Image (tube, rainbow, N blue to C red):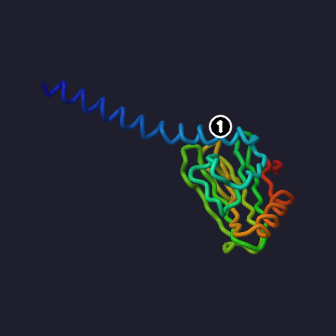
Amino acid sequence: MIRHLLAFVLLAASVHAATLWYLPRLAMNTAMSRLETVGATPNTIVHVPPTDETSRRVVRPSPDLLYSVCLLNLSDGPVQIRAADWGGYMSLSLFSGNTDNVAAVNETQTDGDIILSVSDGAGADIDLGSPRGIAIIRRLVTNGDALARADSIRRQDDSCEAMEPT
């Protein structure tokens, strides 16, 4: 009887641990696949269209935020992400391959553009802790004029690029 109980507890603990490890990675792979449907490719910034009632590219997108995303692939080295200052609220968030929010920086923490280098290990501002992840840039747009200005600036000045080896 005790042997069966121990086997059950061991099996339940193993299933629980496997679920905790697997589900976040499944969620991130699903998010990356959804972003690929709007043209996202590794280490390239993609400017997502404004959110409407049909949008579900990110979990619960906000209609007053303008999103840009970059699928990060750090297997060939660090990547530098630049979110251009546009004079309003913006943030840059980094998510690792298991959905951990590794870093979040907003415009109040910088003097102008937000520029971060990201790697899977040493050699950059941020250690993502995985070879793949997602960077999300958000800009608060409360009216049509702000939307037009933010969209123009992000399309000209945002970037997500592999860094040259030093």
Element at label 1: helix
Q: Where residue 159 sits: x, y (%)? A: 80, 54
Query: Relative to the observer, which residue lies in front, 49 or 107?
Result: 49
Q: Residue at x 74, y 52 (%)?
A: 49
Q: Residue at x 76, y 41 (%)?
A: 39
Q: Residue at x 76, y 61 (%)?
A: 83
Q: Is residue 9 left or right of residue 37?
A: left
Q: Is residue 23 above or below residue 79?
A: above
Q: Is residue 113 above or below residue 62?
A: below
Q: Where residue 40 sits: x, y (%)? A: 74, 42
Q: Where residue 18 sits: x, y (%)? A: 42, 34
User: Hey, which quadrant is residue 156 in on the image?
Assistant: bottom right
Of the 4 image quadrants, the one containing the N terminus is top left
Query: Amino acid type of disc 1?
Result: Ser
Q: Is residue 99 above or below residue 92?
A: above
Q: Residue furthest front?
A: 53
Q: Residue at x 56, y 55 (%)?
A: 101
Q: Where residue 59 sits: x, y (%)? A: 57, 50
Q: Is residue 105 above or below residue 134?
A: below
Q: Residue furthest left?
A: 1
Mark 1, other Cα within 10 Å: few <14 / some 14–19 / many ≥20: some
> Total number of numbered labels?
1
Query: Relative to the observer, which residue lies in front, 117 or 158?
Result: 158
Q: Which residue is mark 1?
A: 33
Query: Relative to the observer, which residue lies in front, 162 or 65?
Result: 65
